[in-house]
Amino acid sequence: MSEHTDSKTDAEDSIRAIFNEIPLPHERHPNNFLSYFGEVLARYRRSLPREMRSATNFGKYILGPYFGQPVDRNRISRAEKGDTSVTFGVYAAYLNEMGALPDILWAMEGGRSGSLRYLLLVEEELAPQIQKAMMAANDKLSARAEQEKNR
């Protein structure tokens, strides 16, 4: 074996595999955060009306439309444990159903609306706030115009 191949093998052997670690419950470790994330997803599902709470019905009627087919109970169970092998689409469907995607994007942008695309995506959610701000601005403009008129 060449020297180059040996060093590559050594580098591959030294990869940490963080998701394979079993951290203590109090550690700020990705697996603990994912486990908690899964618990939040499970609580959301259990908060739904009785007929939608079962993993079977949740997978069929809530998550199924995202994929064009039901999501099986096993995948739902794994997602609710924070399993890293579950596809992001399942997590994204949960988050969208929870109405959390806009808030997650907001947090990822560091509290700034970083792009027009973000604003377009959350326009419906922000519509009441925008309407209220526009009415307040119009009131201020009207008051200012009246003030200048009476000078």
Image (cartoon, rainbow, N blue to C red):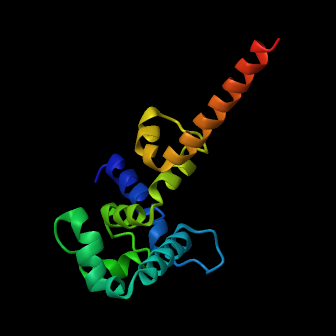
Query: Closest to the observer: 86 or 91?
Result: 91
Is 101 placed left or right of 61 in the picture? right
User: Which x, y percent locates residue 107?
Assistant: 57, 51
Which is nearer the eye, 4 or 64?
64
Quadrant of the image for the C terminus?
top right
- Residue 73 seen from this side: no
* 97 versus 8 height, above or below: below
Can the viewer see residue 84 in this picture?
yes
Tell me which corner region of the image, top left, top right, bottom left or bottom right, holds residue 138.
top right
Question: Residue at 61% across / 80% down in the picture?
Answer: 24
Number of numbered callouts drawn: 0
42 to 68, vertically: above or below = below
Where residue 123 sits in the image (x, y, percent)?
45, 43
> Residue 35 in the image: x percent, y percent?
50, 76
Q: Between residues 129 and 43, which one lies in front from this camera angle?
A: 129
Q: Position of residue 148 (x, y in %)?
A: 77, 14
Q: Which quadrant is home to the N terminus? A: bottom left
Residue at 34%, 64% in the rendered image? 93
100, above or below 83, in the image: above
**Outermost residue toward the right in this view:** 151
- Which residue in the rendered view is the most extreme toward the front? 150
